[in-house]
Structures are given as structure tokens and as C-alpha cells.
Amino acid sequence: MMGKIQEVPMKSQMLPNIISLTLSAVMVFVLAALNLSSASAQTGPTPTLQPTSEPTVQVVATEAPAPVCDPSRSIQVSGTAMVNVTPDRVLIQLGVQSNGSSAAKVEAANSKTIQRVVNALKKQGVAQKDIVTDRYIIEPIYDDYADLRIKGYRINNVVAITLRDLSKVNAVMVAALEAGANQVLNTEFYLSDLRKYRDQARTMAMTAAKEKASDLAQAAGSDIDCVLNINENTWSYFNGWGWYGGNSSSRDLWTQNAVQNAAPPAEAEGALSESGPISVGQISVRAEVSASFSLK
């Protein structure tokens, strides 16, 4: 006899499971809410983007086109300017010429004399760095040029002195002559800051050229436009001629560095003067340019 199977109601079995799942879901929700609240407290409120009332406009600058010059219609002029200034340096060239029957004898005599001259210059306050040998020439003296018979030798020894105290010019020259110098070849006044005055003269010369071109163009019923080219006419008044009209390379270098574009001493009122044959006066720094302009 088969036993009777007792049926268990389904609701009584599912109820505990439903309650357990519900409690688990509630706990997960509560923990998530707590974590979200903590994160919000740490980071603060989330910023919001506010729309701008005006749109952003980007402006791009473009370079203006360069003016076009017409080189077929042009005018060419020149301009010259001169600035008179008082010099603050002087270059003096003193020489010792010696003659003798033999090269050795004349060299020994010339060396002793030139050393006495240098010592006399130093006693006048001239520094050693301001005394340099400018030229040293030894040459034979011929008795008869037809058969080139030599009867002796001649030495020309020239020193160049840079004097920074212009009040000592005459005293220095007298001391050198008394010590044995028998030649005063050159005395040139110049400026230590020549560049400043040369730039002034250049600017004035260019202004003169532009004004001249404008006046000429307006007289012809036109006007100047662009500068087509500019040339500076560089030259020096001091040419640095050496012995027998020959050119001295050392003097050329000195001329380029020190007295470039210096004109002859200008006659001006108020010029400096000292007792003696040398008067400082003024020198003129000159500039000359040539320029061509296109016409409108």
C-alpha cells in the first residue's frame, strides 16, 4: 500500500526567499546612496557652462602691400654736409735722417739718435704705446748713377706720435728736435669719437639730397616717390703720401681708421690756440651721398 504524499504549499516555501532578496536590495540601495552623498560633499557642486552673450570674433591682420615704384621715371641728386668740431687728438710724424760711409755706421748713429728722441718724448708725458715706428728706409747714396758706384748710405727713420693733450704739441715738437730729430713730416688733428660726427654729417647729407630732389621734382610739376638707391662717396683728405711721393701703407691704414672723411682745418671763430707755430683750430667732418628717387 502506497503511502500518501504530503503536498507542501508553494507560497510557504517562496516567502522567506522573497524577503531575503528584498532586504539585500534595500541594503545595496542604501550603501550606494551613502557613497554618492560622500562623493558630492568632497567635490562640491558641479560647475555648469554658461553661454556667452556675444560670439568670439578672430581678426587676422594682413600686411599692406608695398608701394610700387616706377624706376623708369627717376631723378638723381647728390647731397653734401660738413660738421665743424674741435679735435682732441693729434698725430705728429717726426723723422731722423742719417748719412754714413757704411750701412753699419749709419745704422748705429741713427739708432742712437732715434732713441734719444723717444726718451725726450716720454719725458714730455707721451706713453710708449703712443710712439710707433712709421717708416724705416735704408738706401744707398750713389757717387755716379751711370755706373752705380756707392759712396755711402742714408737712413730715414720716422716715428708717429699720438698726442692726447693738445696743449703739449709745441713742447713735444721742440723737445724732439732738440734731442736730434731733423724732420717734422706731418701734423694732423683728428677726433677720437669721429664716428658720432660722421653719422651726423651723413644724416645731414641725405636730408640735403632728399630736399634737393623734392625741389627739382616740384619745379617740373611732379614729386618724388620711393628711394631707388643710395651711394656714399667715401674719400679722405689725408692721403698719406710717403717718401718721394710714394704711398705709405701704414699711413693709409691710419687714415682709414682715424681721420676718414676729415676735411682740411676749418677757419672758425673761437678756435683754440697756443703759444707757438701750431694752432689747433677746428676740423670739418664731411659726408657726401648720391641718391636716386622715383617720380610719382
Image: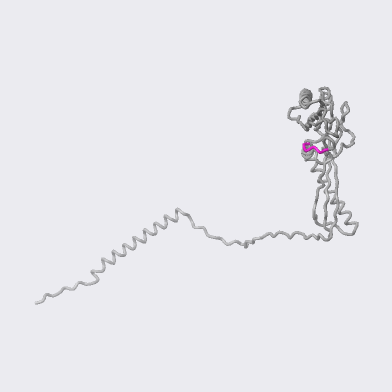
Report the span colored magenta. 246-250
Lateral position of residue 44 relative to residue 107, left or right: left
Q: Nearer the viewer, residue 97 or 114?
A: 97
| Residue 98: image location, x then y, percent | 81, 26
Displayed quadrant of residue 140: top right
Residue name at image x 86 percent, y 52 percent = 77
| Residue 126: image location, x then y, percent | 77, 26
Q: Is residue 248 visible?
A: yes
Residue 14 inside the magenta-drawn segment = no
Judge whether 295 appears above or below 88 on screen.
below
| Residue 286: image location, x then y, percent | 84, 42
Lateral position of residue 274 relative to residue 59, left or right: right
Q: Of helix, strand and loop, which mostly describes the magenta segment?
A: loop
Lateral position of residue 59 relative to residue 221, left or right: left
Q: Nearer the viewer, residue 205 or 47?
A: 205
| Quadrant for the N terminus in the image | bottom left
| Quadrant for the C terminus in the image | bottom right
- Residue, far left: 1
